[in-house]
């Protein structure tokens, strides 16, 4: 497959890179180009660069090493260097041929794996192609996902009928006893690093549609939050770096914990990293498979850490209060603070981010 750089999906990852870098575009432009593409390599993969010694091969090797791209000289001949750039980490497992055969049988024909996609954390996520069609494949670990994905299909159809921009489900099913797959249409777009007001308004409008869909109560986010807040979190031993923030959240938590409304569709991870925009237009809301029922406040408040403008944060909180109540919003914010601090107490490398997020969310309590 051949494509112009701007036609390559930003989330696509590669198992290798082979290049004679365009040295003559200038040092700054070259460094930016290499940084952009090297960071899109899978863990455990390699890049091979052919550079003439007289054109700065040795200085480029030093820059790559200093920049966190472990680079060694693999070969040298007739004034040229072959540089090998290694990406740390174990390589991701390839998709098994049997898995692709199962998916092909379920969806009416074979697919070609075009590459891996970023995101998904523990999931295998890949871009597939069939003729001119593109699709996103996600492999879910755990037997319980089988029924959850089956429930997703009618919910997605209802959302799309209401104009909600979530990708069409092409197919889903079992790969074996513990693994299931979800195949959805691919949508072009990018997640904004710092959303503007038009992008925020588009996200708020999408969240409003959540209130028009009433999924089954097999996965109730409101019940999970209430159980967490009532389940002894007040006696939990937090990491010393986070305990003061936990005490602040517990002090302002409404008592008794309010009964959170339920019934609205709840995405569960309604963040800007799960939204694709074409300019200011919201082209897709993805990663919907963890959906459940609950309150729209859960999804609205998930937007807050991605907003840099204080006025935009205020808009979100006020909108959530308008649709629910101040007590519901306070309870949901306290849940996000305490759950984040609890997770960081078990994963100390996340402490700084958890503290920053706790400070932000505490300042937004209504």
Image (cartoon, helix red, strand yellow):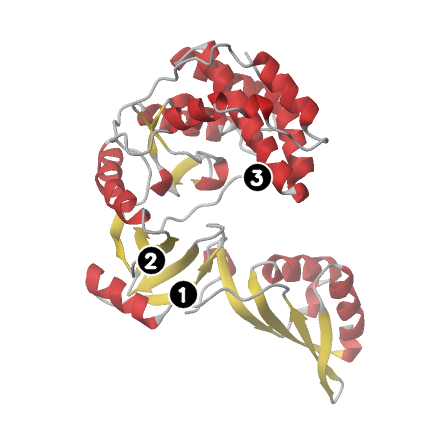
Query: Is residue 353 shown left or right of residue 41?
Result: right
Q: CA distance from mark 2 to mark 1?
A: 9 Å
Q: Is residue 54 left or right of residue 104?
A: right
Q: Earlier in the sequence, mark 1 or mark 3?
A: 1
**Looking at the image, which residue is at 35% across and 17% down?**
261
Q: Label 2 belongs to which residue?
A: 134
- Disc with the residue nearer the chain's start (3 vs 2): 2
Image coordinates of residue 329 in percent, x first then y, are 47, 16
Left or right side of 6 for 21: right
Q: Quadrant of residue 104?
A: bottom left
Q: Position of residue 190 (x, y in %)?
A: 48, 45
Q: Give residue 219's quadrant in the image.
A: top left
Task: Point out the image quarter for the N terminus.
Answer: bottom left
Residue to which mark 3 is pinned? 193
Q: How dense is the environment of label 1, judged by Cα within 10 Å: few (below 14), some, or many (20 and up)?
A: some
- Work out how far the residue at label 3 is from the one at label 2, CA to CA, in angstroms: 25 Å
* Picture residue at 65% right of the left edge, 40% below the top: 350
Q: Are marks 2 and 1 in contact (CB under 8 Å)?
A: yes
Residue 286 location in percent, x, y? 39, 42
Asked whether residue 181 appears in the rendered view, the answer is yes
Mark 1 lies on residue: 114
Q: Secondary structure at mark 3?
A: loop
Identify the element where label 2 is drawn.
Answer: strand
């Amino acid at each position: 497959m051949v494509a112009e750089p701007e036609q390559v999906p930003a989330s696509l990852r590669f198992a290798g890179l082979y290049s004679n870098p365009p040295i003559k575009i200038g040092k700054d432009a070259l460094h930016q180009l290499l940084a952009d593409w090297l960071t899109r390599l899978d863990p455990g993969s390699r890049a091979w660069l052919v550079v003439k010694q007289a054109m700065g091969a040795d200085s480029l090797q030093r820059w790559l090493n200093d920049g966190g791209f472990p680079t060694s000289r693999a070969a040298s001949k007739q004034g040229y260097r072959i540089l090998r750039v290694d990406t740390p980490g174990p390589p991701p497992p390839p998709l098994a041929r049997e898995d692709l055969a199962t998916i092909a049988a379920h969806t009416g024909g074979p697919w070609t794996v075009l590459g891996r996609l970023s995101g998904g954390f523990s999931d295998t996520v890949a871009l597939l192609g069939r003729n001119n069609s593109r699709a996103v494949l996600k492999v879910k670990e755990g037997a319980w996902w089988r029924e959850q994905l089956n429930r997703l299909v009618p919910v997605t159809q209802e959302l799309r009928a209401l104009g909600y921009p979530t990708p069409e489900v092409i197919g889903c099913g079992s790969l074996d006893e513990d693994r299931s797959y979800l195949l959805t249409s691919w949508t072009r777009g990018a997640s904004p690093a710092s959303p503007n007001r038009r992008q925020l308004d588009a996200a708020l409008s999408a969240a409003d549609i959540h209130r028009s869909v009433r999924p089954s109560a097999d996965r109730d986010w409101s019940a999970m939050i209430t159980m967490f807040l009532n389940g002894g979190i007040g006696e939990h031993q937090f990491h010393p770096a986070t305990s003061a923030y936990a005490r602040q959240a517990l002090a302002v938590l409404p008592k008794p914990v309010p009964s959170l409304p339920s019934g609205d569709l709840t995405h569960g991870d309604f963040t800007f990293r799960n939204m694709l925009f074409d300019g200011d237009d919201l082209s897709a809301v993805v990663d919907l498979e963890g959906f459940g029922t609950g309150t729209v406040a859960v999804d609205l408040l998930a937007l807050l850490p991605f907003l840099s403008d204080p006025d935009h944060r205020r808009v979100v909180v006020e909108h959530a209060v308008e649709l629910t109540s101040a007590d519901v919003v306070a309870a949901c914010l306290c849940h996000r603070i305490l759950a984040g601090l609890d997770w960081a107490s078990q994963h100390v490398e996340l402490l700084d981010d958890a503290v920053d997020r706790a400070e932000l969310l505490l300042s937004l309590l209504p």
